[in-house]
Image (cartoon, rainbow, N blue to C red):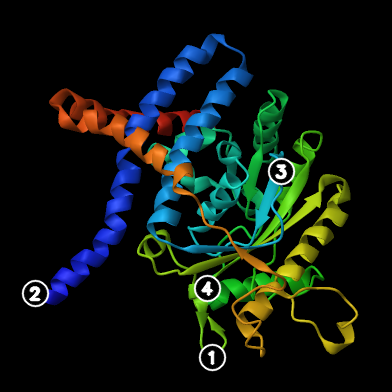
Amino acid sequence: MLLSLVVHTYSLRYWFPATVMLGSAPAYLLSWGAWRLLSTVLPARMYHKLDDRLYSMYQSMVLFFFENYTGVEIIIYGDIPKNKENVIYLSNHQCTADWIIADMLAIRQSALGHVRYVLKDGLKWLPLYGWYFSQHGGAYVKRSARFSEIAMKKKLYTQTQSGTPMYLVIFPEGTRYNPELKNVIADSQAFATKEGLAVLKHTLTPRMKASHIALEAMKDHLHAVYDVTVAYESTHKVPRQRKPAPSMPEFLCKECPRVHIHFDRVDIKEIPSEPLFFRRWLHERFEIKDRRLNSSESNLSFQRLLTDFYESEDDDKICRFPGEGKPSPLLLSKTLPSVMILGGLTLPLLLTESGRRLYVRTWVYGTLLGWLWVSAFP
């Protein structure tokens, strides 16, 4: 009996925030849909401005649960610019919670509404969310030879032509790094060897196509690339081993006490545009995240971020990145108002019979229309 109560209480730590986040989606979509209809006769810039504000409201509610509710401590290494910029955000990829890390940095720069994602193609079929992410400026891409360069270029070019602020999140590895999936890591390392690139241990070999297309399509619109390295403290396993990163449910169940984020801003003028040189530049950035130096390479300035984090023999370096890490708590004033506003919009739908019917229809018809839309306009 007591064990059942403990298990049930533990599950509620995930189900409560998940219910609120998913439950407010129809109210959010109805609000956005009303604005979309009203803005059809207005300039695109005006539509994007309020769309970004609405998106910021929803995502700050999400961050209320992923930061304030979980109590996770965010440790940042490096200085995040105070001013908003048009950027490409490049990061290592370990779990579904990585998408939230981008939001965590963006809200600290007051740029949360500008976040847009490059997502794998299968995610466009997510109910409501898959369609809306595309409407908000995200791009869906297929892997390997099925990658559609034209579709992605067109999407990004349209956004930049209308002056849309851009905080474009890309995970160049293409799939999540999981230390237990030895075959995925081995295939990635074999690809690096075949291409004459340095073999990486704590990340997968980055693929350049999506990042390079984004850079080329938006080069006159961008200020910088944010090179971000993320390590979840819960993934460190004694003795100096690594375990899988937490999933979103595990994160919401407060299983990750700290997230370490190494931030490096690279001015857009410093990034080569020619494909071959860009590929080398991108791989070098991932070498900095990962690489274990040989003694003959001691003159190089690689920081060995993830290698030191997981394998350092120095107890002062284990489970931390080089340099000074500063705790960065998120104020409730940044997130709680959004919870109250979206909750206030959602409750009336659930308290009346007609509201509940509208709620269900929004989920059903919104999903079906979204699927039809992404099928017609991939």
Which badge, 4 or 2, is on the more N-terminal residue?
2
In space, the residues marked 1 and 3 are separated at their CA atoms by 38 Å
Count residues near mark 3 (Cα–Cα under 10 Å), then give few for <14, some for 14-19, many for 20+: many
Q: Nearer the viewer, mark 3 or mark 4?
A: 4
Residue receiving disc 4: 233
Q: Using the image as rendered, state which of residue 290 and residue 320 is in the foreground.
A: 320
In space, the residues marked 3 and 4 are separated at their CA atoms by 27 Å
Label 2: which secondary element:
loop
In space, the residues marked 4 and 2 are separated at their CA atoms by 33 Å
Which corner quadrant of the image does residue 262 belong to? bottom right
Q: Which mark is residue 60?
A: none
Classify the position of the C terminus by image quarter: top right
Which badge, 1 or 4, is on the more N-terminal residue?
4
The residue under label 4 is which amino acid type?
A: Glu
The answer to whether the residues at label 2 and label 1 have Cβ atoms under 8 Å apart is no
Classify the position of the N terminus by image quarter: bottom left
The residue under label 1 is which amino acid type?
A: Pro
Residue receiving disc 1: 239
